[in-house]
């Protein structure tokens, strides 16, 4: 009935937005998504941790006890009442730097995945829907990019373009799309065979409308799950890059470049507070996001109707 | 089968060619000039120009690419390092062994640990053991390898003093088997933890997917012992998709090697990559990227072929598609 009304009574109901449709399928009881998500206690904890980190990152200037680059009167001292996580060799407060570094990690994670998801989705949609030589071309290019070891490629490109926060986001964004493209293409190939797509073709809809309004919403669930783990991956990549000195540059604090100081044996042995805390923050954030991704996978799987 | 293999190889060739082109374009985008790094800035411009001509940097880009490709195909020659003047093939050849040793052992160990754990975890789904294994695998993929590396050095090398902090052999020693082995332990543990974390989840979900199949119900219905059902009927089929992991792990391991070799001063490809990036040694970086990409392409090719051998449905579906 709904279909009938939408397609026949176009004039009366012009603004039905299929993107807003529930992609979990009809007949899904309301709230089932949350009910299934909540079963994963670790994912709920992860959501809490990430939420807390995001709040800290946004409110950093008000929460951090010191400015991240301010020199205090203690140098390389261990944790104390004035400096909960101690100070580094230059005299900067480690806790404040960690709070500010959350901004870097979270923005790299989210922004770079948004870019690579947009590119990959577009290429995957086109490749899967049109098939033929377009598909062959796009998939071969995808193969080429996937043949380079990812970290090596990032390192080379970032050494050429130059380090820095914006560049890292762009590099991770523009090199991260091949996985997304393959995933979306796979979903499109399956969705293309369904009756409702054949119906929209028969009704003479324009291709962009079929691609973005009819196919994309149904390919969204795996994409969202992939993107979630992509955020975790991007945070790890940024940390590795900054650790090697080719990512976010000091004095801007990043968890990765804070860990870089531990490459010297004296810091590693005598000043563990300088490298343990940023490392723990990376683990906590990545672990939380991975747990959330896993729960999303469970909650969004249409086969799973417990 | 022959058709399938040929098709795979024919697809790999344009990819390989494209890889060299992308590689070259990236290098050409570089703003810095290796001559600037080499030549004393006080030197007259003419001398710097002579150096550029000597290194072949004055020719148009397509000509440089063509020369490079022709030397590679005809002579297996990747050119000379712009910094040390050594042949790139020799530099890479010297470093490839240690990296492949590190990667090979980590991959083998990782699979040896992950496959049984993943299978047990799936067989006893939702048990305490399952939760422990799954949590462990999440830790394996979430702990940054450089942090794990630093932590292990801190505990086992600095505090307990059981193992060496870096290098492949003790300075001045001949580099016997035991010597290399003790140096190998820490970097291997880090890479193995990563491989294990990723693989457990694949094995587990692959086993769970198989668990609902009709033929397993049939096997149980005819009264087969559970151990036989799991080992013979379920596991053999569940492990086929695992073959693809080998193809996916190799590029990730190369990336891991860059970071790990830096921390442990392991004399391999990763360290060479980082040092050539730092000194803008383009010819060496190009060679390294190419070697890594070739290894990955061959690994994928091999994976596809092994997959087809293990799962006859693949080549049959291809044969059907070719006829229609």
Image (spheres, rainbow, N blue to C red):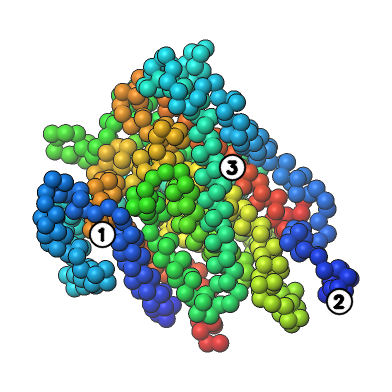
| 3D distance between C-alphas at marks 1 and 2 | 62 Å
- Report in which chain the residue with disc 2 lies: A
Q: Which disc, if any, is residue A8?
A: 2
Q: Residue at x 26, y 68 (%)?
A: B61
- Rendered location of residue A212, percent (x, y): 67, 67
Residue B218 as seen in the image, left or right of residue A270: right
Q: Quadrant of residue A39?
A: top right
Disc 1 versus disc 2: nearer the observer: 2
| 3D distance between C-alphas at marks 3 and 1 | 36 Å
The residue identified by callout 3 is: A289
Disc 2 versus disc 3: nearer the observer: 2
- Residue B23: tell me if it is visible: no
* Circle 1 SS class: helix
- Report in which chain the residue with disc 3 lies: A
- Taking depth in this image into account, of A198 and B45 the one nearest to the observer is B45
A149 w.r.t. B25: above or below = above
* Circle 3 SS class: helix
The residue identified by callout 1 is: B287
- Taking depth in this image into account, of A222 and A257 the one nearest to the observer is A257
- Report in which chain the residue with disc 1 lies: B
- Rendered location of residue B321, percent (x, y): 54, 82
Q: Residue at x 69, y 77 (%)?
A: A206
In terms of sequence position, does the residue under pointer 2 or pointer 3 come before the other?
A: 2
């Amino acid at each position: 009935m709904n279909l009938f009304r939408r397609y026949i009574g176009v004039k009366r109901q012009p603004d039905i937005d299929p993107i807003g449709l529930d992609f979990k399928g009809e007949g899904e009881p309301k709230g089932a998504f949350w009910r299934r998500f909540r079963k994963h206690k670790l994912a709920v904890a992860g959501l809490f941790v990430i939420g807390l980190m995001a709040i800290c990152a946004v409110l950093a200037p008000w929460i951090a006890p010191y400015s991240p680059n301010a020199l205090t009167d203690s140098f390389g001292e261990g944790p104390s009442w004035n400096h909960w996580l101690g100070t580094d060799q230059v005299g900067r407060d480690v806790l404040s730097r960690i709070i500010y570094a959350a901004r870097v990690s979270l923005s790299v994670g989210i922004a770079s995945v948004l870019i690579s998801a947009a590119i990959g989705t577009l290429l995957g949609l086109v490749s899967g829907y049109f098939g033929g030589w377009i598909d062959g071309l796009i998939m071969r290019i995808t193969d080429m990019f996937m043949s380079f070891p990812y970290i090596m490629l990032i390192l080379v490109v970032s050494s050429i373009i130059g380090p820095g926060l914006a560049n890292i986001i762009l590099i991770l964004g523009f090199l991260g799309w091949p996985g997304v493209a393959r995933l979306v293409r796979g979903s499109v190939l399956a969705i293309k065979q369904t009756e409702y797509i054949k119906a929209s073709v028969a009704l003479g809809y324009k291709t962009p409308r079929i691609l973005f309004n009819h196919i994309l919403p149904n390919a969204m669930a795996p994409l969202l799950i992939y993107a979630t783990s992509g955020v975790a991956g991007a945070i790890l990549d940024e940390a590795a890059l900054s650790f090697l000195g080719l990512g976010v540059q000091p004095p801007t604090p990043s968890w990765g470049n804070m860990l870089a100081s531990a490459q010297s044996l004296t810091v590693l042995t005598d000043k563990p507070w300088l490298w343990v805390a940023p490392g723990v923050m990376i683990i906590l954030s990545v672990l939380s996001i991975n747990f959330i991704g896993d729960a999303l996978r469970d909650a969004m799987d249409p086969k799973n109707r417990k | 089968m022959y058709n399938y293999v040929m098709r795979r190889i024919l697809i790999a060739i344009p990819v390989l060619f494209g890889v060299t082109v992308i590689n070259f374009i990236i290098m050409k985008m570089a703003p810095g000039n290796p001559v600037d790094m080499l030549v004393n800035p006080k030197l007259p411009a003419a001398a710097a120009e002579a150096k550029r001509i000597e290194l072949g940097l004055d020719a148009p880009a397509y000509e440089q690419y063509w020369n490079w490709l022709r030397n590679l195909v005809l002579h297996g020659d990747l050119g000379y390092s712009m910094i040390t003047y050594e042949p790139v093939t020799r530099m890479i050849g010297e470093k490839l062994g240690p990296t492949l040793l590190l990667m090979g052992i980590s991959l083998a160990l990782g699979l040896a640990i992950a496959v049984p754990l993943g299978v047990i975890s799936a067989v006893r789904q939702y048990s305490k053991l399952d939760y422990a294994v799954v949590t462990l695998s999440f830790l394996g993929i979430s702990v940054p390898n450089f942090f794990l590396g630093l932590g292990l050095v801190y505990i086992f090398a600095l505090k307990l003093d059981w193992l060496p902090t870096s290098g492949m052999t003790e300075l001045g020693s001949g580099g016997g088997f035991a010597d290399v082995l003790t140096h190998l332990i820490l970097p291997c543990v880090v890479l193995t933890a990563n491989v294990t974390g990723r693989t457990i989840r694949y094995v587990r979900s692959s086993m769970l997917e198989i668990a609902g199949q009709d033929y397993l119900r049939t096997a149980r219905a005819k009264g087969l012992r559970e151990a036989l059902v799991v080992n013979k009927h379920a596991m053999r089929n569940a492990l086929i998709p695992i073959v693809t992991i080998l193809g996916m792990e190799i590029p990730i391991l190369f990336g891991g090697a860059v970071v790990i070799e830096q921390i442990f001063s392991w004399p391999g490809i990763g360290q060479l990559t980082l040092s050539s990036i730092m000194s803008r040694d383009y010819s060496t970086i190009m060679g390294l990227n190419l070697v890594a990409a070739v290894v990955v392409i061959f690994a994928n090719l091999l994976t596809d072929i092994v997959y087809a051998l293990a799962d006859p449905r693949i080549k049959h579906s291809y044969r059907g598609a070719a006829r229609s």
